[in-house]
Amino acid sequence: MSNSEDEDLPQLSSHALAALQEFYAEQKQYTDLGGDDKYNIGIIEENWQLSQFWYTPETALRLAEEAVAAAGEGGRVACVSAPSVYQKLRELHRDDFSICIFEYDQRFAIYGEEFIFYDYNNPVDLPEKIAAHSFDIVIADPPYLSEECLRKTSETIKYLTRGKILLCTGAVMEEEAAKLLGVKMCKFIPKHTRTLGNEFRCYVNYDSEL
């Protein structure tokens, strides 16, 4: 190749090159994760642009224990936009439960076949392998405090669940949640690793210790 042809090739600026190297390093970090480490809460950092706020380990554990009790032995659990609960479930129960994580963020693809790409704007646009009413309990944490987001996420929840629903969202959504899903507010108050501006609560549609 001649020098003139070399000069015609597009060149990355130093800023773009640094950004690209950072991207590849981040991708390698997730590829290299294995064993117990990849289930640690916070191993994937919050992305505020996607309205991501992780639960504290204590809250994730309490919700995971609730899911186990509600699903029953050998049960199936769907975690919709609730990765902290998925991670805690998998940390505690490696093989005795079937668990899927429904997430828009492709970083969670490190969880292999249990990762299901999910966009709440297309509530039931799911893979064929996800049959209707195939989960004993659905734990959902809609990313945005809006009627539209809750309404669309509710379509997903009703499609997935055999009956039991555990919803985590703002206290301001209580009336809308009851109307859409028939859930009632629990006494248990979930906490996040960062302080949120809105009061956050749990809701269920079955008898619960929460």
Image: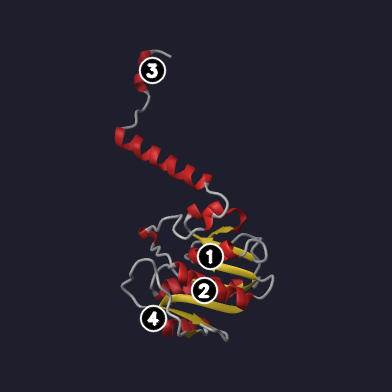
Cα distance in 3D space between marks 3 and 1:
54 Å
Say if mark 2 contacts mark 1, CB within 8 Å: yes
Q: Nearer the viewer, mark 3 or mark 2?
A: 2
- Amino acid identity at mark 2: Leu
Residue 5, disc:
3
Does residue 162 appear in this view?
Answer: no
**Residue plotted at (58% across, 65% down):** 92
What residue did someone put label 1 on? 88
Q: Amino acid at mark 3?
A: Glu
Labels 4 and 2 touching (C-beta < 8 A): no
Give left or right: position of 6 versus 168.
left
Distance of label 4 from label 2 (alpha carbons): 17 Å
Q: Marks 4 and 2: which is nearer the front?
A: 2
Give how far apart the Cα atoms at labels 4 and 1 are.
Answer: 24 Å
Amino acid on which the number 4 mark rests in the picture:
Ala
Q: Reading the chain from its start, which is encountered first: label 3 or label 4?
A: 3
Name which residue lies at 39% across and 60% down.
50
Tag 4, which secondary structure?
helix
Q: How is the image coloured?
A: secondary structure
Disc 1 marks which amino acid? Lys
Query: Quadrant where the N terminus lies?
Result: top left
The Cα atoms of the two marked residues, 3 and 2, are separated by 60 Å
Q: Position of residue 113 (x, y in %)?
A: 62, 55
Label 2, residues with CA under 10 Å away: few <14, some 14-19, many ≥20: many
Per the image, the residue denoted by label 4 is: 171
For the view shown, which residue lies furthest in the right direction? 74
Residue 63's disc is 2
- Precedes in sequence: disc 4 or disc 2: 2
Please rate how many residues cluster around mark 1, counting C-alpha atoms within 10 Å: few if below 14, some from 14 to 19, many from 20. Answer: many
